[in-house]
Amino acid sequence: MKPWRSNQHRPLLTPMSIIAGRLSVQFGAHYLERQQGGRGVLLGGVPGVRPAHVAILGGGVVGTEAAKMAVGLGARVQLVDINVEQLGYLETLFGSRVELLYSSQPEIQRVVPDADLVVGAVLVPGRRPPTLVSRALVAQMRAGSVIVDVAVDQGGCIETMQPTSHSHPTYETEGVLHYGVPNMPGAVPWTATQALNNSTLPYVQQLAQHGLKALAMDESLAAGLNVRDGQLVHPAVQQVFPELAAPTKSAG
Amino acid sequence: MKPWRSNQHRPLLTPMSIIAGRLSVQFGAHYLERQQGGRGVLLGGVPGVRPAHVAILGGGVVGTEAAKMAVGLGARVQLVDINVEQLGYLETLFGSRVELLYSSQPEIQRVVPDADLVVGAVLVPGRRPPTLVSRALVAQMRAGSVIVDVAVDQGGCIETMQPTSHSHPTYETEGVLHYGVPNMPGAVPWTATQALNNSTLPYVQQLAQHGLKALAMDESLAAGLNVRDGQLVHPAVQQVFPELAAPTKSAG
Amino acid sequence: MKPWRSNQHRPLLTPMSIIAGRLSVQFGAHYLERQQGGRGVLLGGVPGVRPAHVAILGGGVVGTEAAKMAVGLGARVQLVDINVEQLGYLETLFGSRVELLYSSQPEIQRVVPDADLVVGAVLVPGRRPPTLVSRALVAQMRAGSVIVDVAVDQGGCIETMQPTSHSHPTYETEGVLHYGVPNMPGAVPWTATQALNNSTLPYVQQLAQHGLKALAMDESLAAGLNVRDGQLVHPAVQQVFPELAAPTKSAG
Amino acid sequence: MKPWRSNQHRPLLTPMSIIAGRLSVQFGAHYLERQQGGRGVLLGGVPGVRPAHVAILGGGVVGTEAAKMAVGLGARVQLVDINVEQLGYLETLFGSRVELLYSSQPEIQRVVPDADLVVGAVLVPGRRPPTLVSRALVAQMRAGSVIVDVAVDQGGCIETMQPTSHSHPTYETEGVLHYGVPNMPGAVPWTATQALNNSTLPYVQQLAQHGLKALAMDESLAAGLNVRDGQLVHPAVQQVFPELAAPTKSAG
Amino acid sequence: MKPWRSNQHRPLLTPMSIIAGRLSVQFGAHYLERQQGGRGVLLGGVPGVRPAHVAILGGGVVGTEAAKMAVGLGARVQLVDINVEQLGYLETLFGSRVELLYSSQPEIQRVVPDADLVVGAVLVPGRRPPTLVSRALVAQMRAGSVIVDVAVDQGGCIETMQPTSHSHPTYETEGVLHYGVPNMPGAVPWTATQALNNSTLPYVQQLAQHGLKALAMDESLAAGLNVRDGQLVHPAVQQVFPELAAPTKSAG
Amino acid sequence: MKPWRSNQHRPLLTPMSIIAGRLSVQFGAHYLERQQGGRGVLLGGVPGVRPAHVAILGGGVVGTEAAKMAVGLGARVQLVDINVEQLGYLETLFGSRVELLYSSQPEIQRVVPDADLVVGAVLVPGRRPPTLVSRALVAQMRAGSVIVDVAVDQGGCIETMQPTSHSHPTYETEGVLHYGVPNMPGAVPWTATQALNNSTLPYVQQLAQHGLKALAMDESLAAGLNVRDGQLVHPAVQQVFPELAAPTKSAG
């Protein structure tokens, strides 16, 4: 069983991914309301009326949490991912309550046009995710459908998606509402702040107890060091500001 | 909440309906195997591959039990019924695990062509059920799909369905396998016999203890009397054999 | 087991109650976001951070559906009702996933101040519901908490609640956001219209087939007649417009 | 928690194991029907009548999937395995819905004679599985019970089991029906083919993009090479055809 | 669907039945501990070791609640009842998690000797329940097994059961621990008192608001009147104290 | 996903931890009974009456199993742990059925005073666990509440907890019942013995087949060697009895 794919190289971001995944469906449900410009569809339907159809692209932390919320609200849920083992893990989590589909262009072209809500949840650490949904495919969606892309700050996986802001969170293109706020967890700061605290506290405690020696004691803490003795030491940041880089690559 | 619609006027038949509903999906899964002439689809799919789509027409005892088995095997399940209250009850039973749709010709025409397995579960006590699925609609189904009609002995709700037998249980029409054995519970006599015993035993015990007086003590028992003093007394049977009827309608 | 309390005297309104109950939590989650003026709490929390606390007043159709959605989103849910049998029924539905409490002022005074979201779901057919939550109690809630009252058009059960509109859905009083749009299902017309169609269609079909005779065939249909031969015949409407009333009470 | 034991050294076979495990119960249910020579038992029984008893030998991928289906159809399920950690994992999956028993001869001798359906799911990679069920034990089963052995092509774990074929899938020995078709997934080629495609596609894409270099880039791909420059290079195949082996063991 | 059988003629006792049913398994688990004289079996077992087997006689309120707790603790649970409709209802509640068996002497003789814990939950309003388990059958149980009879104050359904007290709650007969405290809810007065309050409060409020007129307004309240104008008026109590009876049967 | 934290360095103790965790709630429920000196609270309450509140300190094997039982009996359950990843894993196990809280003194001071039952489940291998609950905090609990500490033999995490025995299992301090029997699984020897057998059997079989060579074949077996050639060789035991130590550290 492939486990819950934590953002292994970015542990502090995992709680933010959980929050963003959960909010993506909350936002989607909201923008499907008629007054927000949506189709006027209730995610769970009512007995006798079809529930909304939610398509989730990507089955990592974000996609898994989005699927939990969509299931909890009673929607019909499909999730596509390129990793068969991860799909196997998700089946142990959701049983047959979520249709788990292998990601391919033909499959995406079957799934997206029929969806009321598409959640983009494709994250490729350190790289722009591939464009899975073209403008032509968006144009096939029903008018008033909604797309939420959680990875918009890294480019997103939807061709028509642009970053938006909490003050103007959506725009309409090809008849479809697009939600592309990069900092979703900012909507629930009470929850997000505590979650971040819980994840960072152990590192803060190490520093408070051991000072600089803590870097030697914990490799992952050392890897987070950006500036030492007035010079940039983090390789990724050095690349951006080469003139500030320390002469020797001391922490990597 | 509309309760589980028992065959109220035919209490002894309820366990047979339960068995038939459960077997309908077991038979359907079997005939979807390639060696039986079916499409070669596994009801529950595998992670990454779409599960089969089961459409159940009717949400009474038979349809409810069929839905339980289809859900248990991991299929995608849709159930249509004409009674909104019954659909509400089924939602308390299945949550959003089964799509519960109001029965109408447009809905049936959307649901049936996409189904791998159609279960006919429409029972109108004492009457022929309406034809919900026309030959033209059957012809739109994928080749190798399967139809099982539980009410075939009362005419069934599928235009192309004919009664078959346990020795030759299926035939193919319009590219679709048809299963129409009227006495489904005959496939599992160990279970069916005990179920019938449990339902009939209270009546047998009344007769054993009180003899003919039992008829006066229990209206429903009396209503089942067919022959008394050598003459037919049951109104429905009298209609068929008027020459054997008792002169006075003594029990009804 | 006390069944799902349908609006027995108003069957056509049951689907609207289902929709309103489900939307009450969707709206509540939305207004708890920081940008909407709420506390910035995610209903389901994240592992390690307390989930939001949802208090539902009333366990009929509206309250039951609100509880389903709140559970589905991962909140901690408490529901109070005055009917012990209904609470027993709800336990068969939710197990111990929802805390089911007998409604009393002391209990309400324990539950409400600790809630992030209060859903008013008290409906007394034809009467104004009792005021369960006083202004003083609202003032004890945390700043940025949210109240949604589904029965606001009949007076509601929250002292500080006033009807609002889809264009200006909320206002703030005592530091708490109040949502009081009377016609909630108007937010999801695609779903709501079909649900109403499904419930009214049988009556329309009776009229189409039998004309005025349908009134004689179905007592519940006859009870809905408002105007006959140019005169008001419905008792409740007659009371409002006595000058238009028919001389004889012909349909009641 | 011991994870889902994938066929780690044979990743492409995992989906086949899933399919075989699921089909084993579907076949078992079918052959328990009276017309197929079985006991005439419905797996899930009916309320008041004992469900069938399914005993699963082995708790790897095959046994886990068999248990899911048997649970889904309502049977009483017992599963034995020799690995305590795997049993612990299965409890997180099934809760107490499946009785999880440590494999020992005394336990197997208690479990098997009482079973209506025995599923052999013992796979020891590259070796013949041990014989867990002797002919004498089979003879203690009730007449008309069914045994399905998923590992029959590697010898199986049932003394009386012989390979059969899709055209003659069963035979009867000691009063018990034996099903021993080695290529079970052949019954559902639509599902099986897509599952295989999903698992093999990443390797095909590597070859298509990088040609022979792909072997250097992916150790697991290289390990699958059988013939290079006209000579056998795979050690296992070399053992079978030593005269065709390359002089140097280039890929292993 | 036969609903949850409330003690319809004794509504105030329903919460006491719920409590007694839940406690019966809590007591059973306790007395199965070695230090209490029991077999030393943990109800839920551990992965690899058989769970305890709980047999519940009777599927009304008491038996249903006992089954919930036994399932919650992970035991294997069988429940027998004489009412097929009630068994059908219990299946909607428990799915196949509880084996639901039709009550007959042969079935009871199969179930009881194999049980670690037998819960007697047979209540026949106003009558002594039948003896379902004879001394001979008790003697077949394993040494250190436990029997709890909830209806012991009405005679119980176990031949060897005698009423005991909270101070000496158990005794041993035929090697089996017997628990027969009539007033089980007395063990949890905090919970029981509030439950009784919730059930009786509506009647108290009627009396407080309307005084004696409340009797005329509510038939069920009037039926509970015992003494009026210094004379016994309740028929059942009159039978016991005929000399105190009112001359006319004023309230019945 | 952080997996089920097995006692990795003490594999044979895992089943004992499972049993102790499950028993901790069984004991807690028992001592909450009024006759045992407890508050008289039923863990699951009844519909309309608040369930008991169970607070579990620590989310390893013991805490996880305690949570399963508390949920199974219908209590409100909160669990605190210091490991965010483990809390994430527990959410996949319990969904939102258990409130999962990050362990901190402020959180513990909110959780403990409101609890009816506190389960101490903090195990730090080879070290005394930290004192999480001070005497002052215990004094804030309601009279008649119960504390069970599973790790009392290693010092426990409750300031007021002392080891007790199966013959005198509890004492009262600050109005709260304390249960501190170190060898909990001794209460269910039938289950515990088999569980231990299942875990130790593979090692016994290795020794039986290979004699002393088994030590060379299995590192974990070798690490368990205490005495060789009449001399102590296990480092931990050598520290306690240095005069009996072998001159060379042969097995570690």
Image (cartoon, coloured by chain):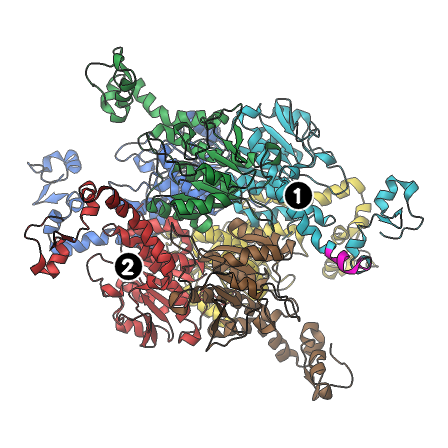
Chain colours: A blue, B cyan, C yellow, D green, E brown, F red
Residue at 49% x, 44% y: name it: D113
Q: Which label number is shown at residue B17?
A: 1
Quarter containing the N terminus of chain F: top left
Direction from residue E48 to residue B210 in the image, left or right: right
**Any magenta on residue B12?**
no
Q: Which residues are magenta?
A: B205-214
Query: Is B99 in front, or is E82?
Result: E82
Q: Which label number is shown at residue E116?
A: none
Q: Nearer the viewer, mark 1 or mark 2?
A: 1
For this orientation, the residue located farthest to the front is D136
Query: Is F229 in front, or is A49?
Result: F229
Q: Which residue is the site of mark 2? A: F103
Q: Residue F124: x, y in percent?
A: 23, 58
Query: Is B99 in front, or is C252?
Result: B99
Q: Is residue A24 visible?
A: no
Q: In whole angstroms, how far apart are the C-alphas of marks 1 and 2?
A: 54 Å
Residue at 44% x, 24% y: name it: D193
Residue at 30% x, 70% y: name it: F165
